[in-house]
Amino acid sequence: MIVEPSGQACGATIRGIDLSGPLDDALVAAIRAEWLRHRVLAFADQAMNDDALERFTLAMGGFGFDPFFEPIPGRKNIAAILREPDEKAPIFAESWHSDWSFLPRPPAGTCLMAIEVPPTGGDTLFADQVAAFAALPEQRKAYLRSLTAIHSAALAYAPDGTYGEKDQALGRSMAIRPDDSAREHFAHPLVNLHPETGEEALFSTMGYIVGIEGMVLLWDNRAVLHKATGGYEGHRRELHRTTVAAPG
Ligand SMILES: [Fe+2]
């Protein structure tokens, strides 16, 4: 097995192995070790099919639970990330996220097997959250460790969410199934201790975090100006506001 680190914060390319057939324990252990070390692995020169993808996923820890996606025909655990050439719906998942972070037990990893790729574009980007956290000043780290984030799929997968009924009307080809269950909330620490490496990682995801537990904003109207901003078109925003009387 040849491992070529990307030279960036995370990522490596793996060559010299064949994932198309049965996988022996030693190979799986070696892949797992590189996965934990580099966080993102690209397996070059593979000739895999859906059976091989399922075998690989089972070897890496088994299938996670995938809400809001209709699996492809004949498979319970494979979803198609799909965009047709003439599709007009917005690009799917074009904001930083960790898959299904709103679940009580979010998945450990995600596998993507390319079936057809465009000649240009279509990259998946990664941002190392262990490195991001490590780069923060100690005081900031201590503050962030004290926070609990509230995750929900509502902004994305509720009927009025980004991938809800309006989006379905745009003719998206992906089999997304919006549902009211997306409105459920689940809290996770904003800084996660990685269960296998013991590293601290930011567990923040723009699409799914809807709040920080116990966070209240207070400003001094005598000392600052403030203004609102948009940027959440199609989503509901409600904050309860009071004013503090002037002394005397
Ligand atoms: Fe994703």
Image (spheres, grey):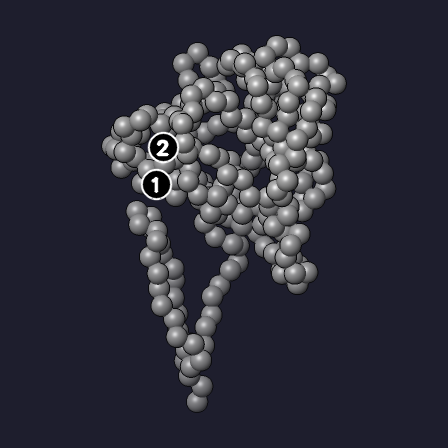
Decide: marks 2, 1 in contact (CB < 8 A)? yes
SS label for mark 2: loop
User: In percent of the image, x 30 and y 35: which residue is there?
Assistant: 89
> Type of residue at label 1?
Gly
> Type of residue at label 2?
Pro
SS label for mark 1: loop
Does 84 sit above or below residue 146? above
Image quadrant for the C terminus? bottom left
Image position, residue 194 (x, y; %): 67, 40
Q: Which residue is mark 1?
A: 161
Does 48 sit above or below residue 223? above
Image position, residue 116 (x, y; %): 42, 21
Residue 178 visible somewhere in the drawing: yes
Pick the front one: 104 or 128? 128
Give the mark nearer the N terminus: 2 vs 1: 1
Image quadrant for the N terminus? top right
Pick the front one: 148 or 167? 167
Residue 58: quadrant of the picture: top right
User: In percent of the image, x 47 and y 66: which residue is there?
Assistant: 217
Residue 46: quadrant of the picture: top right
Q: Which residue is mark 2?
A: 178
- As drawn, is 153 to the left or to the right of 24? left
Residue 61 visible somewhere in the drawing: no
Does 69 sit above or below residue 166? above
Image position, residue 143 (x, y; %): 62, 60
User: In percent of the image, x 35 and y 64: which residue is there?
Assistant: 228
Disc sitting over residue 198 in the figure: none
How many residues crowd mark 2 within 10 Å: few (<14), some (14–19), many (20+)? many
Cα distance, mark 2 to mark 1? 8 Å
User: In percent of the image, x 48 and y 43: which residue is there?
Assistant: 96
